[in-house]
């Protein structure tokens, strides 16, 4: 798969096969994530891969509480689409059966350019998802835990001393083929 095909065909996957992702594949995906550009080459990211059944169950329990806290946000955003609320909440609790989750942390939390550092972590997450897709592994970037204030708990539980929690990325072999959502007009201009 060439780069443009990867960019244009990657989708957020919310239903996965139960097949485990080989360790070598996960290592290659993370190596690609760590090749992202970063503000003054500080490489601000720290990743934790969760894949054991016990740790996945523990993480899903946290996400169940995230879902409860996130419900009012979903109700406000999708007032006219209750099915989207239900689908999102179901995914947050089950992770769509994903066999692995990557937690991304902002390692250099005392860095003076916080915005640049967060952009660096985001670039690494995008690299991770594109590298996964190139290997046939689907992903879904989840920010609800951070948005709802669960970051300190996740940091203490999975990466003490390794910086602020940014987001979680579900990984697994897709058990669905979502279509591209409509693209919004007027998001680019040439001067």
Image (cartoon, rainbow, N blue to C red):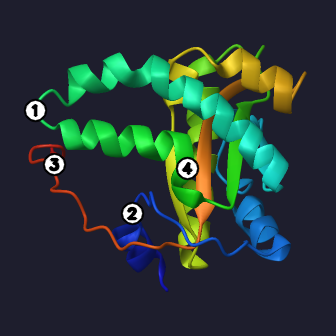
- What percent of the width, then of the height, locates residue 10? 41, 67
- What percent of the width, then of the height, locates residue 8? 34, 70
Q: Look at the image and tell me whether residue 163 can be seen.
A: no
Which residue does the numbered mark 4 point to in the structure image? 95
Q: Nearer the viewer, mark 4 or mark 3?
A: 4
As drawn, the label of residue 80 is 1
Secondary structure beneath dot 3 equals loop
Query: Along the line of sight, which residue is nearer the eye, 115 or 140?
Result: 140
Give the CA separation, mark 4 to mark 1: 24 Å
Indicate whether 1 appears above or below 91. below
Give the CA separation, mark 1 to mark 2: 23 Å
Secondary structure beneath dot 1 equals loop
| Label 1 or label 2, whichever comes before in sequence order | 2
Indicate whether 146 appears above or below 80. above
| Label 4 or label 1, whichever comes before in sequence order | 1
Give yes or no for contact between labels 4 and 3 (Cβ–Cβ under 8 Å). no
């Amino acid at each position: 798969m060439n780069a443009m095909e990867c960019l244009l065909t990657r989708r957020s996957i919310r239903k996965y096969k139960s097949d485990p992702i080989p360790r070598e594949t996960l290592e290659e995906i993370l190596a690609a994530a760590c090749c992202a550009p970063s503000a003054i080459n500080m490489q601000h990211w720290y990743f934790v891969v969760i894949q054991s059944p016990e740790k996945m169950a523990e993480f899903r329990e946290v996400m169940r509480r995230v879902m409860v806290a996130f419900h009012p946000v979903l109700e406000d955003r999708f007032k006219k689409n209750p099915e989207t609320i239900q689908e999102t909440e179901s995914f947050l609790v089950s992770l769509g059966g994903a066999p692995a989750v990557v937690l991304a942390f902002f390692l250099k939390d005392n860095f003076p350019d916080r915005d640049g550092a967060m952009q660096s972590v985001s670039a690494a997450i995008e690299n991770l998802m594109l590298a996964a897709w190139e290997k046939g592994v689907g992903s879904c970037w989840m920010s609800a835990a951070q948005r709802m204030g669960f970051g300190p708990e996740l940091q203490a539980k999975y990466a003490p001393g390794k910086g602020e929690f940014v987001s979680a990325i579900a990984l697994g072999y897709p058990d669905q083929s979502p279509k591209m959502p409509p693209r919004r007009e007027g998001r680019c201009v040439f001067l």
